[in-house]
Image (cartoon, rainbow, N blue to C red):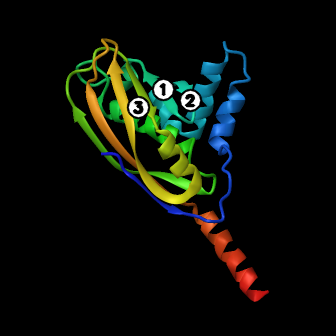
């Protein structure tokens, strides 16, 4: 399913990168040796559960996010594989970050639907690659409300895909941006 719906905000002109995209871009100035550790630290502080689970943010751009999780005790199930909940976290985080790097600063991204089919037992650590198309990026950058279906591929160390996922992400204006719009409208009407 390729969902693309939105509500346009005519007050928006040429979009610029949002706070998350600007913060990630700043990390690119850090020496390459320190960059992965610092990126994981920053993302782990922003979304504490990702740090607890030991997710590694390998690549982050507005077009694609790559996140890995090693098969270590803290994320294992009873058969020493990566737990189903950790697989879901990995896929959700990758899709959420790629959406988060594209929605406007006055919008809040929310996971609307997630569907995961478990196809086979995972071998070793996992790698999730989430991508958005240019059309999806434009939709998120230009609209204050909408939803997209985000593609994510989760593969294990053997190169196989133990799960197949579909994530539909929505974005809405933040409560703060709604309040400021109402205040501005009230001030304009009073003038």
Give x and y (percent) for residue 82: 32, 23
**Which of pointers 3 and 2 indicates the residue nearer the eye?**
2
The residue at 72%/31% (across/down) is 26
In-image side of 54 versus 31 (left or right): left
Asked whether the beta carbons under mark 2 and mark 1 sit within 8 Å of each other, the answer is yes
Q: Residues within 10 Å of mark 1 (few under 14, many from 20)?
A: many
Instruction: Give SS at disc 3.
Output: helix
Asked which secondary structure carries label 1, the reply is strand
- Of the two numbered discs 1 and 3 on the same chain, state the one appearing first in sequence: 1
Tell me which label, 3 or 2, sits earlier in the chain.
Answer: 2
Q: Which residue is mark 3?
A: 90
Compared with 40, 182 (above or below) is below
In the rendered view, tell whether residue 147 sits above or below residue 153. Answer: below
Q: Position of residue 78 (x, y in %)?
A: 24, 23
Please state which of residues 43 and 63 is positioned toward the viewer in this rendering: 63
Q: CA distance from mark 1 to mark 3?
A: 10 Å
Determine the residue located farthest toward the bottom in the rendered image: 190
- Please identify, in this view, whether the residue under mark 1 or under mark 3 is nearer the observer: 1
Asked if 79 appears above or below 98 in the picture, the reply is: above
Q: Determine which residue is flagged by label 2.
A: 60
Q: Decide: marks 3, 2 in contact (CB < 8 A)?
A: no
Q: Which residue is mark 1?
A: 66
């Amino acid at each position: 399913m390729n969902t693309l719906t939105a509500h346009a905000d005519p007050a928006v002109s040429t979009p610029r990168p949002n706070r998350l995209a600007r913060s990630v871009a700043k990390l690119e100035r850090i020496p390459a040796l320190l960059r992965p550790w610092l990126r994981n630290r920053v993302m782990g502080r922003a979304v504490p559960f990702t740090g607890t689970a030991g997710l590694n943010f390998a690549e982050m751009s507005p077009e694609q996010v790559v996140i890995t999780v090693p098969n270590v005790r803290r994320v294992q199930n009873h058969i020493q594989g990566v737990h189903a909940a950790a697989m879901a976290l990995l896929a959700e985080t990758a899709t959420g970050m790629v959406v988060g790097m594209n929605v406007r600063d006055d919008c809040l991204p929310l996971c609307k639907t997630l569907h995961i089919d478990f196809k086979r037992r995972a071998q070793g650590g996992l790698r999730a690659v989430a991508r958005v198309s240019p059309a999806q990026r434009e939709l998120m950058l230009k609209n204050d409300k909408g939803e997209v279906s985000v593609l994510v591929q989760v593969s294990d160390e053997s190169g196989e895909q133990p799960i197949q996922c579909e994530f539909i992400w929505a974005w809405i204006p933040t409560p703060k941006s709604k309040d400021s719009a109402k205040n501005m409208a009230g001030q304009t009407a009073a003038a």
